[in-house]
Image: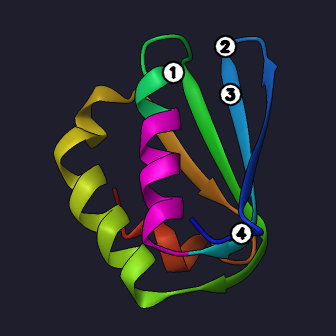
Amino acid sequence: MASNFHIYNYKTKGSLHLKLAGDFDGSSAHELINTLLENDKDYYQIFIDTNDLKTIYPFGKEVLEKKIGGIVKQFNNLIFIGENAHELSMNY
């Protein structure tokens, strides 16, 4: 995992908000997937805020795309937001 990558979270009624910060690499993608899997049935919506990502490495995007493609149907509403949302959302 990129040494400066963090996932901050807060909850609202029925929603989980994940704020990604730092550099997004392959290990960061795994951390995000694991966080999603830990919370997949607890929330109606999961928002992933990408505003604080500094660098998004191609390998991180590739890992996320491969891993999330197989599990995305588990999530009711997975919503990428922020200025880097287009980099990570890939129309899941």
Q: Residue furthest left?
A: 70
User: Which-is-in-front pick, marks 1 and 3?
Assistant: 1
Q: Are marks 3 and 2 in contact (CB under 8 Å)?
A: no
Main SS class of the magenta portion in the image: helix
Q: Are marks 1 and 3 in contact (CB under 8 Å)?
A: yes
Among numbered discs 2 and 4, the one appearing first in the sequence: 4
Quadrant of the rendered image containing residue 12: top right
According to the picture, the residue beneath numbered tag 4 turns out to be 3
Relative to 3, is 18 above or below? above
- Image coordinates of residue 3 in percent, x first then y, are 71, 69
| Dot 4 alpha-carbon crowd within 10 angstroms: few under 14, some 14 to 19, many 20 or more | few
Which structural element holds mark 3? strand
CA separation, marks 3 and 2?
A: 7 Å
Residue corresponding to mark 2: 14
Q: Is mark 1 in CB contact (under 8 Å) with mark 2?
A: no
Q: Which amino acid, mark 1?
A: Asn
> On the image, numbered disc 1 is attached to which residue?
39
Q: What is the x, y in percent for residue 9? A: 78, 35
Q: Which residues lie in the magenta part? A: 25-35
Label 2 to label 4, Cα distance in Å?
A: 31 Å
Q: Which residue is mark 3?
A: 16
Question: What's the amino acid at mark 4?
Answer: Ser
Cβ atoms at labels 4 and 1 below 8 Å apart: no
Tell me, for residue 61, which label it has, or none.
Answer: none
36 horizontally vs 8: left or right: left
Tag 2's secondary structure? loop
Q: Closer to the camera: disc 3 or disc 2?
A: 3
State the residue at coordinates (24%, 35%). 73
Residue 6 in the magenta stretch? The answer is no
